[in-house]
Amino acid sequence: MELRAFGRTGLNLSALSLGTMRCLQSPETVAAVLERAIAVGINHVETARGYGNSEVFLGRAIAAGGWRDRLVLTTKFLPGTAAAELDRQIDDSLTRLRVDHLDCVAVHGVNRADHLQWLRGETGGVAALLRARDDGRIGHLGFSSHGPLDIVQGAIATDWVEFANLHYHYFWQRNAPAVTQARDRGLGIFIISPADKGGQLYAPPDRLRDLCAPLDPLAIAYRFLLARPEITTLSTGPATPTELDAMVATLGEQTGPLTADEQAAIARLEQQHRTALGSDACGQCFACLPCPEAINIPEVLRLRNLAIAYDMDAYGRYRYGMFENAGHWFPGRRGDRCTDCGDCLPRCPHNLDIPALLRDTHDRLHQTFGRRLWG
Ligand code: SF4
Ligand code: SF4
C-alpha cells in the first residue's frame, strides 16, 4: 500500500489507516483484523481511550504478534481534562497498549469554543500533553474535530499542533478551507470515516452506483480525497478481516491526480445534483445561520440534497436521527423545530423557502428510534 508523508512529523503512513471501533467483539477479532491489516501494508492504527477495550485488546495483539516496530500508533484523549488527570491517563494508555511511547496523540473532539480554549492552553490541562511530548512518552500531537469550520480552523492554527483528523468528504466539503489551511501549515491530514460518515458508501443506493459505474462509489470517495497529496491517510473501520480486504480492494492501485474516468463520474454526480434539485438545491454556503431555534439548516438541507439527487435516504435517516441525540458531536436541532420566524430568509443567496424545505426533509427522513444511539 502507498505510504504518504504525514505533514512535517517525519512519519510515513499508509493511505488507509486501521480504526478499531468496530472490531472490538473480542481480543481474537482485534488480533485477526490487525494481522490482516499488517499483511496488506497498513502501518497506522488508531484507537482512543473512549473506545471500550480497544487499547487493551490492541496492546495484547501487538505484543503477541511482535508488531510494535511495524506500526504507528495513535490514541486520543478528551479535551477539558485537568493536567494531573491527563498525565495519569497518558501513563494508563501506555500500560494498556503495552508500549513505552505513543507515536501520535490526538485531542479527541475539539468541537466547541471551550475545547478550543483548552487546546490553546488557556485552562492549563494541555500542559500535560506538551510535557509528555518533551519527555518522550508522546511522539507527535494533533487533534480531531467534528465541529464547525471556525473551531477547526482555530485548532489548526494552534502552534504545537502537528496533525489534524478531519471530516472532509466528496458529499461534505465544508472543511475544504481547513484542509488547505492544514496543508499550508505543514500538518499531517487524517480523514475520518470516508465510508460511513461520508455517505454509508459501503452500501450505496442503486442510483448512486449507476452514476459512478463502472467505478464504485466508495472508490470515487477514496480517490477524491487521495488525489490531493496533502491528505495523508483515510480511516477505515472493518469489523472483520474480510471487510478490510474489501476496503483495500476498493482503494485499488491508483495514485496521483484523478483519472479521466474518475473525473467523468464526478461530473455525472454534479449534473444529477443540478437536474434533480433544480432551484431547491441548498448551496451549503451557511449564510442562513444562526437560527434562533438552533436548527442546523445547512446540514438538514444537505441530507435533503443527497436523498433527492442520489436516493441516499438511508444515509439521510441515519444522520438526521443524530440531531438532538449526539451533543457536540453532531450539533443543532431538527427541521421540524422551525417556527417560521423568517430570520434566515433574507440571508439565503438562493432565495430558498427554507421553512418549507426543512419540513419536507423532516417528513422524508425522520424516524423514531427505539433507543438512544449516541451519548
Ligand atoms: S424561519 Fe425557521 S429555520 Fe429560519 S431562522 Fe426562523 S426558525 Fe430558523
Ligand atoms: S443560506 Fe441558503 S443555500 Fe446557503 S446553506 Fe443556508 S439554505 Fe443553503
Image (spheres, rainbow, N blue to C red):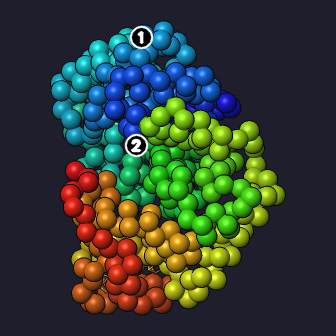
Q: Is residue 38 visible?
A: yes
Q: Is residue 237 left or right of residue 225?
A: left
**Ligand 2 within 8 Å of the CB at mark 1:** no
User: Where does the image place residue 304, in percent across and percent down from the top left?
Assistant: 46, 76
Q: Which residue is mark 2?
A: 144
Look at the numbered disc 2 and give the secondary structure of its residue.
strand
Q: Residues within 10 Å of mark 2 (few under 14, many from 20)?
A: many
Q: Residue at x 50, y 59 (%)?
A: 199
Q: 166 above or below 78? A: below
Residue beneath the point at 41% across and 26% down: 30
| Residue 277: x %, y % from top left | 56, 83
Between the C-alphas of marks 1 and 2, the distance is: 27 Å
Q: Residue at x 39, y 48 (%)?
A: 145
Viewer-nearest of discs 1 and 2: 1
In the image, farthest residue toward the right = 260
Q: Residue 285: in sight, yes or no?
A: no
Image coords of residue 172 (percent x, y): 51, 61
Quickly name the residue at label 1: 63
Q: Amino acid at mark 1?
A: Ala
Which corner quadrant holds the N terminus?
top right
